Image: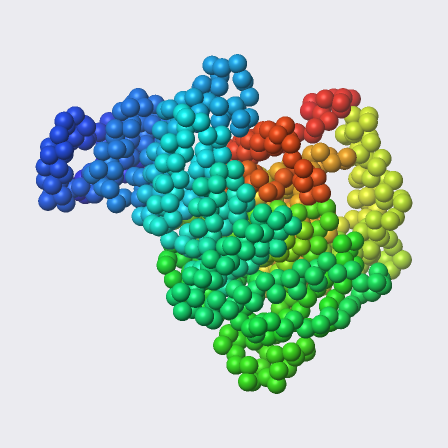
């Protein structure tokens, strides 16, 4: 009866707290027993009290109530730092194997660290809290900051040892704290604590499952060139462990390190592969050892193919020699997301068979005929013939077959691409973020929301992006897709006059049409040069919307003849567009022209590609992109009679609610992305080679600002502002 009453009291207190009555909520769950334990002077007194509670089966409920009360005290600022510290430490003594208590303690220490650094900076002459060098100098001088860092690392490590429930918040943040702390130039005041931090991570390497580190491989790989040698040694040890545990999957993520143009990275990558091979040989896993050995030749074959430029620039196909290695191609996992992504709810499990899909089709052979795409970079579409896992070589005449034969179950398609100006690593990191967001969309701690979101079917269509070197990569081909531009161009209005320009959308998508281009420039100039947005909108309505009315509605009607299929495809298009709009607004995704938005023609799903223009980079284009997401008249037309007020609005609200409810997770995942020293999010790849110290400082400030902008958006603030707003003077009686 006592336990049930405590549970009821706790739930009532939560209701009070959610209603804003924090003091009443705390008074309902205050525990005299916990206060007495805090006042206890000897460990024997504490043990005696805990033993009594354990016998009465009250210990678990006692700890739950105490932790909830502590969290509310921190939130309300009702207790001093030393008192809160004492409460968390006592909780760790009461229930040392409770993951949530360690995680909450780590979060508290992390927040106190940030507050103290900002307070010390405000007291000093330096006012820029976004400069990492200023923060580093504060940490060097302040022993308390160092103590908080070590405490947070230890508590995050303990939480991850016990459970992977908060892996997407805890592990990226633990690594960020460690990397930033050991990157500070060593001195007498900080050296011993940096060594202690490294030792704490060494302990984490032994206790945290290898599959957990698989989820943060990009963050680990990016710090292979860390300034601290001991940190680099530990990072390499973690990567060797992951590669030896999951060689078939991890080899693809580590490929670019092995084939880097930088000799130091290349050497470390080779050492990691050699170390993993030795471990596999020692464990008598010869098959996997040979797989890693043959992977270098396969990666080189793909890189050479991506770089190859045919002599005839206008050719649409090319013939290549079949790849031959020391092992069959079918022994390699295909670089597709279904094969390389950790199964849902499998993070933290020890075995590869539990963490990844059990049955994945394999690649029997590559087709010798490669299709050349028409875009400027001339990427290649590579086809692989698929066979079931475990398919015997004896069933085919030879492994060098380059056409479909009996026993094949289909084809896999990949895009081999060389980026001269962009950086495929950006695309790979954004896909990692999208996978985390998909997990959030499909599950929630609130049971009521689970059903609602599953009903709405909010998901981002993602695909695998594997970097083979700094400028080359292999992308998973998304089947049955066509660009929004092509769909509009192929649409037609069956009831319009045969000779009317309103009948077909082909002219609407003709970028070479001078009349359209001049009209667009007039619209923009009316606002940018003359400050008359009302007139600009009027010109757009008269020149474009009346002359070229939207037609995408008719494409859906012609594509999906069955009424149920048509309704499902249209709904899916609206919901997937809503999910991408929410995510695109939060992370500042730009360059969303009609060829970067694809539609799955089999089911209406919206797919976005090309993530080079991210974190509000579009604001600094010659013609700034100042809209939060793309919502064109043709898209509204496809949504149906309700337009943006139907499924799209409901899906957008649900997606934004999910993102805002999981703000801490998203910020924990995004911070390592923005602090990645290998990728410069603001500049082109060709500008990333020489990096001066002043540029490093600027980049760290930009990263902090981007994090703050995203944080504000996740708190409900609209902070997208035209960079030219000071130059534009509105004359149509509307404020900015």
Q: Is residue 32 visible?
A: no
Residue nearest the observer in this picture, 197 or 522: 197
> Which of the image's four quarters has the N terminus?
top left
Q: Residue at x 37, y 31 (%)?
A: 192
Which quadrant of the structure image shows residue 230? Answer: top left
Q: Is residue 355 left or right of residue 384?
A: left
**Count of numbered circles on the image:** 0
Instruction: Decide which of 308, 343 is in the foreground and name it.
Output: 308
Residue 141's place in the image compared with 332, above or below, is above
**Can residue 498 be seen from the camera position used here?**
yes
Coordinates of residue 350 in the picture (x, y in percent): 37, 59
Pick the residue in front: 664 or 347: 347
Residue 522 % position (x, y)? 85, 35
Image-quadrant location for residue 600 = bottom right
Residue located 50% across and 59% down the image? 274
Point 76% across, 58% down: residue: 378
Q: Which residue: 86% across, 57% down?
A: 497
Q: Is residue 353 above or below residue 692?
A: below
Left or right relative to 526: residue 36? left
Q: Tell me residue 486's x, y (percent).
A: 76, 57
Is 609 rendered above or below residue 30? Answer: below
Left or right of 345: which side holds 89?
left
With 621 as the anchor, is 134 left or right in this view?
Answer: left
């Amino acid at each position: 009866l006592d336990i049930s009453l405590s549970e009821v009291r706790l739930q009532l207190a939560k209701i009070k707290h959610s209603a804003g009555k924090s003091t009443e909520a705390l008074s309902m769950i205050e525990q005299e027993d916990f206060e007495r334990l805090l006042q206890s002077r000897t460990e024997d007194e504490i043990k005696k009290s805990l033993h009594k509670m354990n016998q009465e089966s009250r210990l678990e409920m006692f700890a739950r109530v105490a932790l909830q009360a502590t969290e509310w005290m921190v939130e309300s600022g009702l207790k001093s730092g030393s008192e809160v510290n004492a409460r968390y430490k006592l909780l760790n003594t009461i229930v040392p194997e409770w993951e949530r208590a360690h995680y909450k303690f780590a979060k508290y220490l992390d927040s106190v660290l940030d507050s103290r650094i900002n307070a010390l900076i405000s007291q000093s002459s330096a006012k820029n809290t976004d400069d990492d060098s200023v923060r580093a100098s504060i940490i060097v001088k302040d022993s308390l900051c160092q103590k908080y860092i070590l405490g947070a690392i230890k508590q995050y490590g303990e939480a991850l040892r016990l459970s992977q429930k908060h892996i997407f918040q805890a592990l990226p943040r633990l690594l960020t704290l460690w990397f930033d702390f050991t990157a500070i130039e060593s001195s007498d005041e900080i050296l011993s604590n940096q060594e202690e931090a490294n030792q704490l991570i060494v302990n984490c390497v032994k206790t945290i499952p290898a599959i957990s580190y698989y989820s943060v491989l990009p963050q680990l790989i990016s710090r292979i060139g860390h300034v601290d040698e001991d940190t680099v040694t530990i990072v390499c040890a973690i990567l060797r462990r992951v590669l030896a545990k999951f060689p078939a999957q991890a080899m693809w993520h580590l490929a670019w390190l092995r084939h880097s143009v930088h000799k130091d990275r290349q050497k470390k990558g080779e050492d990691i592969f050699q170390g993993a091979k030795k471990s596999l040989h020692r464990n008598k896993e010869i098959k996997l050892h040979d797989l890693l050995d043959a992977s270098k030749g396969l990666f080189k074959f793909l890189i050479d193919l991506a770089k190859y430029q045919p002599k005839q620039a206008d050719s649409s196909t090319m013939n290549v020699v079949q790849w031959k290695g020391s092992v069959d191609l079918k022994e390699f996992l295909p670089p597709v997301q279904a094969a390389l992504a950790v199964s849902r709810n499998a993070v933290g499990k020890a075995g590869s068979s539990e963490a990844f899909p059990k049955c994945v089709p394999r690649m029997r052979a590559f087709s010798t005929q490669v299709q050349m795409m028409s875009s400027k970079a001339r990427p290649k579409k590579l086809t692989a013939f698929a066979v079931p896992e475990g398919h015997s070589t004896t069933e085919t005449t030879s492994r060098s077959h380059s056409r479909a034969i009996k026993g094949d179950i289909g084809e896999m398609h990949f895009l081999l691409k060389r980026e001269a100006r962009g950086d495929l690593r950006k695309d790979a990191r954004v896909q990692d973020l999208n996978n985390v967001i998909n997990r959030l969309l499909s599950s929630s701690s609130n049971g009521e929301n689970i059903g609602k979101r599953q009903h709405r079917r909010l998901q981002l269509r993602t695909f695998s992006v594997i970097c083979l070197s700094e400028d080359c990569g292999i992308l998973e081909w998304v089947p049955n897709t066509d660009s929004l531009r092509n769909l509009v161009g192929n649409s037609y209005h069956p009831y319009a006059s045969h000779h009317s320009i309103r009948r077909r959308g082909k002219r609407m998508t003709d970028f070479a049409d001078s009349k359209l281009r001049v009209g667009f420039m007039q619209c923009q100039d009316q606002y940018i040069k003359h400050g008359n947005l009302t007139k600009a909108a009027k010109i757009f309505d008269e020149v474009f919307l009346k002359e070229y009315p939207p037609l995408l509605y008719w494409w859906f009607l012609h594509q999906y003849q069955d009424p149920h299929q048509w309704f499902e495809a249209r709904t899916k298009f609206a919901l997937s567009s809503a999910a991408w709009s929410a995510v695109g607004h939060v992370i500042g995704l730009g360059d969303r022209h009609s060829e970067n938005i694809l539609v799955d023609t089999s089911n209406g799903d919206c797919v976005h590609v090309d993530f080079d223009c991210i974190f509000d980079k579009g604001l600094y284009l010659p013609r700034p992109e100042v809209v939060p997401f793309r919502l064109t008249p043709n898209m509204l037309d496809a949504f149906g009679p309700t337009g943006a007020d139907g499924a799209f609005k409901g899906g957008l609200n649900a997606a934004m609610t999910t993102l805002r409810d999981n703000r801490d997770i998203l910020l924990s995942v995004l911070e390592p992305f923005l602090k990645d020293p290998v990728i410069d999010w603001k500049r082109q790849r060709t500008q990333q080679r020489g990096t001066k110290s002043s540029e490093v400082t600027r980049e760290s400030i930009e990263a902090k600002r981007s994090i703050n902008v995203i944080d504000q958006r996740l708190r409900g603030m609209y902070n997208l502002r035209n960079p030219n707003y000071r130059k534009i003077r509105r004359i149509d009686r509307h404020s900015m």
